[in-house]
Amino acid sequence: MKVAEQCLSDKEEVSLMNFEEIRKADDELIMSTYGRFPVCITEGKGATAVDIDNKKYIDFGSGIGVNSLGYCDDGYVEAVCAQVKKLQHTSNLYYTQPQLEAAKKLIELSSMKKVLFCNSGAEANECAIKIARKYSFDKYKNDRNKIVTLQNSFHGRTVTTLAATGQDSFHNYFFPFTEGFAFAPANDLEKTMEVIDNKTCAVMIELVQGEGGVMPLDKEYVQKLVEYCSSFDILVVVDEVQTGVGRTGTFFGFQQFDIKPDIVTSAKGLGGGLPIGACIVSDKCSDVLAPGTHGTTFGANPVVCAGANYVLSQFKDTNLLSGICEKGKYIRSRLEIMPGVVETRGLGMMVGAVLENNDAKSVANKALENGLLVLTAKTVLRLLPPLNISMQELSDGLDILENTLKEIFQ
Ligand SMILES: Cc1ncc(COP(=O)(O)O)c(C=O)c1O
């Protein structure tokens, strides 16, 4: 009998298994697409996660930027539970109020025009790509459908968003990929303009390349690029899946680049832990999609929207945003004097630390042993703590990181 079957039949319930049994069963039952850390998280509160052996960890990863208000924030739990008791799902064939409320808040916070809700970052980007191509098709009726993205970008894992991702390592196995993407070097305006041509309908950028190693774009490059695109009616899509919802210190990152994108995509932190994506458009693109051109069964699910509404309410009714800039500065000031750190970069509470030995993975493993969860992006250490983390938890987590780096570099 296989380990998983044996464990499950012996114990009857997965919740009674120990960590080693869980790991073996997971190997047998779940397709292996992740290099998991050797820990099973069972619960959490604030910025603290608890594992199956009751060990506590300060979490500087937030489930990869998703738990924007940390684990099980009281108000968030209350809002989600109230909604699930009332209406857990209907379909997009009917009107529902939670999605309308979420749209209203998103539009107020972004000064955009209309929203389409979906379930993930990749889906939000797929929608943006469809809107960009249809906008051009409707207006120019020719093969003006090329989309320029940046080298080292990351836009998702669907076949089309992989094609949009500007990293060769993602362009394997799944041929044929969607056609019509070209890649330009970030922060090099001249070379970017060489890639843009009269077949280009849109340019899609991340303002800080998260998965690419926390690489911020230069403000001047972004502004000039947007200006250039606007003069040729080329749409500017800003992928704010990782940078959005307060992460960089403004509600959306584009708000500190002083630009007005045509399309903005959001996901991750928007639902505070529930799966929601949003494609948000300016006036220009607000009527591109019509009935039958796009849709999703789960998109704008009322429970997920109740979570998003609670997250969004925190930006309107509290001083969450100003705290993000302050905490981001504090994180970097502490990191900069830690052993082994040669450079810090990022925006707000999206922070990358370049290490002397470029071995962020070993630091993440050692930090885990020491009670701290951190992320990596390529060879860089990546910190995305919950936006509302207390100064105490933040400072305790940074103490653990400092001790971890001392163990490795001193
Ligand atoms: C900038 C960016 N775009 C898109 C995605 C894909 O989002 P999802 O995993 O929700 O599909 C990610 C995920 O890391 C991301 O960082």
Image: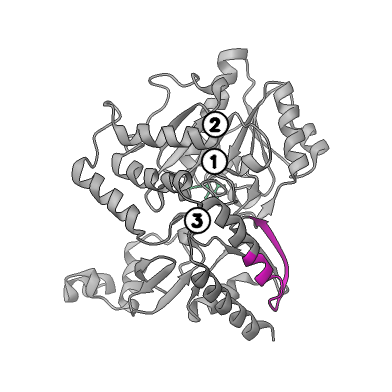
Nearer the camera: disc 1 or disc 2: 2
Q: Rounded to the nearest whole Å, what is the CA distance between mark 3 and mark 2?
A: 23 Å
CB under 8 Å between callouts 1 and 2?
no
> Which residue is denoted by mark 2 in the rendering?
111
Q: Residue furthest right?
A: 190
Relative image position of residue 393 (x, y in whole percent): 49, 71
| Badge 3 amino acid | Gly
Identified at 52% across, 38% down, the residue is 265
Identified at 74% across, 36% down, the residue is 223
| Badge 1 amino acid | Thr
Q: Rounded to the nearest whole Å, what is the CA distance between mark 1 and mark 3?
A: 19 Å
Q: Is residue 37 above or below residue 258?
A: below
Q: First in sequence: mark 3 or mark 2?
A: 3
Label 3 CB-ligand 1 distance < 8 A: yes
Q: Please name whichever residue, 53 or 18, is drawn nearer the observer in this view of the structure.
A: 53
- Start-end of magenta stretch: 330-347
Relative image position of residue 372 (x, y in whole percent): 50, 74
Q: Rounded to the nearest whole Å, what is the CA distance between mark 1 and mark 2?
A: 26 Å
Nearer the camera: disc 3 or disc 2: 2
Position of 74 with respect to 231 (left or right) is: left
Name the mark on residue 65. 3
Determine whether the residue tagged by mark 2 lies in a helix, strand or loop: loop
- Mark 1, residues whose alpha carbon is within 10 Å: few (<14), some, or many (≥20)? many
Position of 93 with respect to 60 (left or right) is: left
Relative image position of residue 286 (x, y in whole percent): 50, 22
Label 1 CB-ligand 1 distance < 8 A: yes
Relative image position of residue 399 (x, y in whole percent): 57, 78
Determine whether the residue tagged by mark 3 lies in a helix, strand or loop: helix
Label 2 CB-ligand 1 distance < 8 A: no
Please identify the quadrant where the N terminus is shown.
bottom left
Q: Please name whichever residue, 26 or 279, is drawn nearer the observer in this view of the structure.
A: 279
> Which residue is denoted by mark 1 in the rendering?
161
